[in-house]
């Protein structure tokens, strides 16, 4: 699998894991990408999850036979990429590890490897022969040591997790030779779940890397981007600015269907008011990775939940925590809630909106026990206010 005549893909696919990071479902699997640059000296860029080491080593040997690897460049230390470092060193004992100061400290901390290392700083270069590699620090995308490596010779950027996505590679690696349909949604979900907290560092990284003349982008997850690299960059740009399109996510918790009736009324009214993109998530059923993805995609957010044990319904609390963690910005917001004898859900949702500095379009609707005509009217008014605010933003 060649990216260019001298750059080989030696990554692997993981179709066994259910939850990436132990948190996020990966129904289409995930790839751990690694790249070999063959020159007078050979460099490997990143490794793979240790569970796949045998396959990884076989691919390396298929590509370069018995030649040694001179350098292992580490762009990112999270163990889905660095997991094979120690094993690889057992097979290539003279291989120097190339990384920045923080990377090398982590190599020692995770794997006890401190010898034969080359520390690089932002902008440093390393000559392999024909290839000149340069190193570009992009901290907090999404770990502090993250770095991108660029081959000036081939105009190829090895970007680490930046521009990555969920989804294993189904035979082909380069975007121009494969059907990429599955990856676009998985890219938004990957961004929302993994990188979503770090909008500002991603913006800084995009600005920094835009000065490079890039022909091919080789991330650590998902396809290699050539034909579609501009689309990929625009997705990362949009999401990291928290920009969203017109539409509303109505996410709710409901134990017996009472709160759900408010959600249904709100969604129906939004539709009657001309809002086309409406996504409803019952938080007892929808996986939160998909809820997050839709919240990153759409401008309107309506949240509702019952009171539970003197607090808010736990699945809603879990969502609020994820949104707070990701510092989601610039959403048109409204909320609703219910209680039987003492209400807490609406208080929590109101405090959440205040903390997030959301544009609150309507008074919350708080319902006691079952939905009556007055509750229904208030839910309709709430939805009309949200739709009106969104339509005001139309250009
Ligand atoms: Fe794919 Fe941040 O590791």
Image (cartoon, grey):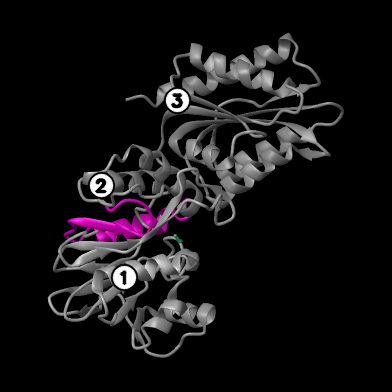
Cα–Cα gap, marks 2 and 1 = 22 Å
Q: Nearer the viewer, mark 3 or mark 1?
A: 1
Magenta-drawn segment = 196-224
Task: Confirm whether the magenta stretch covers residue 186.
Answer: no
Of marks 3 and 2, which one's residue comes earlier in the chain? 2
Query: Mark 1: which secondary structure?
Result: helix
Q: Which residue does the image show at 46% across and 79% down from the upper left?
A: 86
To which residue does mark 1 refer? Answer: 60
- State left or right for residue 358 relative to residue 155: right
- Contact? badges 2 and 1 (CB < 8 Å): no
Q: Quadrant of the N terminus?
A: bottom left
To which residue does mark 3 refer? Answer: 390
To which residue does mark 2 refer? Answer: 175
Residue 137 at least partly seen = no
Q: Pick the residue in front: 246 or 7.
A: 7
- Contact? badges 3 and 1 (CB < 8 Å): no
Q: Nearer the viewer, mark 2 or mark 1?
A: 1
Residue 54 at least partly seen = yes
């Amino acid at each position: 699998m060649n990216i260019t005549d001298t750059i080989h893909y030696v990554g692997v696919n993981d179709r066994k894991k259910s939850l990436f990071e132990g948190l996020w479902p990966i129904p289409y699997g995930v790839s751990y990408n690694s790249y070999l640059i063959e020159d007078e000296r050979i460099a490997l860029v990143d490794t793979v999850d240790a569970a796949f080491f045998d396959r990884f080593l076989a691919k390396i040997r298929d590509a370069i036979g018995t030649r040694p690897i001179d350098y292992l460049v580490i762009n990112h230390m999270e163990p889905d990429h660095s997991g094979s470092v120690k094993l690889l060193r057992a097979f290539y004992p003279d291989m120097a590890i190339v990384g920045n100061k923080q990377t090398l400290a982590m190599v020692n901390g995770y794997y006890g490897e401190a010898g034969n290392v080359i520390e690089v700083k932002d902008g440093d270069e390393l000559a392999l022969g024909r290839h000149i590699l340069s190193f570009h620090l992009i901290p907090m995308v999404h770990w502090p040591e993250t770095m991108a490596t660029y081959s000036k010779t081939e105009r190829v950027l090895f970007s680490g997790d930046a521009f990555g996505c969920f989804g294993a590679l189904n035979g082909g690696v380069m975007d121009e030779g494969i059907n990429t349909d599955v990856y676009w949604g998985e890219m938004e979900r990957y961004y929302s779940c993994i990188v979503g907290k770090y909008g500002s560092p991603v913006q800084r990284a995009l600005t920094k890397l835009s000065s490079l003349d890039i022909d091919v982008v080789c991330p650590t997850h998902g396809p290699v981007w050539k034909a579609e690299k501009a689309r990929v960059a625009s997705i990362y740009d949009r999401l990291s600015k928290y920009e969203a399109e017109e539409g509303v996510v109505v996410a709710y918790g409901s134990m017996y269907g009472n709160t759900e009736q408010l959600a249904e009324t709100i969604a129906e009214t939004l539709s009657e008011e001309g809002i086309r993109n409406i996504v409803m998530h019952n938080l007892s059923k929808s996986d939160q990775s998909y809820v997050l993805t839709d919240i990153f995609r759409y401008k309107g957010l309506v949240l509702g939940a019952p009171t539970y044990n003197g607090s808010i319904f736990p699945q809603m609390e879990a969502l609020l925590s994820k949104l707070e963690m990701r510092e989601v910005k610039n959403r048109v917001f409204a909320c609703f809630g219910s209680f039987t004898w003492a209400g807490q859900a609406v208080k929590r949702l109101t405090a959440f909106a205040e903390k997030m500095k959301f544009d609150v379009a309507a008074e919350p609707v708080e319902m006691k026990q079952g939905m009556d005509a007055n509750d229904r009217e208030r839910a309709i008014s709430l939805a009309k206010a949200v739709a009106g605010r969104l339509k005001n933003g139309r250009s």
